[in-house]
Structures are given as C-alpha cells and as structure tokens.
Image (spheres, rainbow, N blue to C red):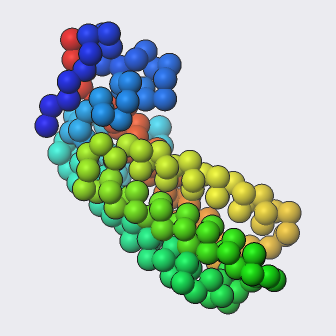
C-alpha cells in the first residue's frame, strides 16, 4: 500500500514535527506499518528489537493491538452488563443508581470503546496509530493515577498491582511501536 503525500510536506515526509501527527498532516497521510531499522534501545526493549525486524513489526503491532482488544473489550462489555461485579473484583461499589450508571459508563462504555478501537486498528491500517496513541495516553493516565492513589492510601492490593503492571507494559509497548513508526518511516521526496 502506498501513501501519497503532498509536496508541502517536503523531503522529511512530515509537517516538521510541529503537529499532532509527526509523520504527516493526518491519519490518512500515515505510512503503513512497514519499517526498516529499529530504535527500541531508548525504551530498554532489546529483546523486542531483536525479535521484531522488518515486516515482523507490522505483525507485532497487530498482535499487540489484538491482545489489547481482548483485554479491554470483553471486560468492558461485562462491566456494562454486570457493574455490581466490580465490588468483588476491585472493591468498587455503587451507592445509588447514578453511581451504577457511572460504573457502566466508565468501566463498561469507556473500556469497550478502547477495545473496539484496538480491534479496528488490527484490521485497518489508518487506525493503527490512533489506537496506539489512545492506549499510550489512557494507560499512562490510569497508571499514574493508580500509583498516586496507592501511595496516598498506603496500600497496593493484588488488583492494583496487576492493573499497574498491565497499564505500564501497555504504555511502554505503545510508545515503542509509535517510536518505530516515527523514527523509521520512509520519507518521500
């Protein structure tokens, strides 16, 4: 698949790095995931660098997004239908109907939407980058808030530890895959 770029983008293939999309003006102008070279050393992911070279990166990104979809979408749908299950799993319970609506929205709707975006990223080239950005920002926010909350409360339950591990790994992998793309995307003259 070839991506056409406007002549205004210049030889770097991007918009000078000043916009939201460092490789181009919009998601539609993004190159497909077919890079050469790797720069995961900054993230300390030498094992990934060795394991994922050339065309294997495209597969690695898709597998990562599929795993994210598998984690987020079913859990979100389950929480949408059974918000009361959060009381036992995470110690989160509703004190009112408004609270139940909030649990359905945040744990059900939001998580289902993230999972759906990740699943769409698996099947559509144009949604890979937005899905990776979404996972990176969302998981970074969750991990920082969870870590801060655990420090304030002075407790790290098994649920909190598992969630922190999942969120931190998701951030690291999302950023690594985004960096591969930004650093190694071919440019057009």
In the drawing, does residue 82 fall left or right of residue 42?
A: right
Tell which residue pokes out farthest to the front in this image: 97
Residue 158 appears in the picture as rendered: no
Q: Is residue 23 above or below residue 120?
A: above
**Image-quadrant location for residue 16:** top left
In the drawing, does residue 55 fall left or right of residue 106?
A: left
Image coords of residue 112 (percent x, y): 48, 68
Q: Quadrant of the N terminus?
A: top left
In the foreground, 102 or 129: 102
Image coords of residue 18 (percent x, y): 50, 19
Image coords of residue 117 (percent x, y): 40, 57
Q: Residue at x 21, y 17 (%)?
A: 188
Residue 156 appears in the picture as rendered: yes
Q: Quadrant of the C terminus?
A: top left
Q: Is residue 2 above or below residue 158?
A: above
Image coords of residue 163 (percent x, y): 60, 69
Q: Residue at x 49, y 53 (%)?
A: 135
Q: How many numbered callouts? A: 0
In the drawing, does residue 152 fall left or right of residue 36?
A: right
């Amino acid at each position: 698949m070839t991506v056409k770029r406007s002549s205004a983008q210049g030889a770097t293939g991007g918009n000078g790095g000043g916009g939201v999309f460092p490789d181009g003006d919009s998601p539609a102008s993004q190159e497909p995931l077919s890079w050469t070279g790797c720069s995961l050393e900054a993230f300390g992911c030498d094992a990934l660098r060795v394991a994922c070279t050339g065309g294997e990166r495209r597969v690695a990104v898709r597998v990562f997004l599929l795993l994210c979809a598998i984690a987020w979408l079913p859990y979100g749908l389950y929480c949408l239908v059974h918000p009361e299950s959060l009381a036992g799993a995470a110690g989160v319970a509703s004190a009112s109907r408004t609270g139940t609506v909030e649990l359905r929205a945040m744990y059900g709707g939001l998580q289902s939407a993230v999972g759906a975006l990740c699943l769409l990223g698996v099947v559509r080239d144009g949604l890979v980058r937005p899905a990776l950005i979404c996972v990176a920002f969302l998981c970074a926010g969750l991990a920082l808030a969870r870590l801060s909350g655990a420090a304030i409360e002075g407790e790290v339950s098994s649920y909190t530890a598992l969630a922190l591990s999942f969120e931190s790994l998701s951030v690291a992998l999302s950023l690594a895959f985004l960096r591969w793309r930004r650093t190694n995307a071919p440019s057009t003259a």
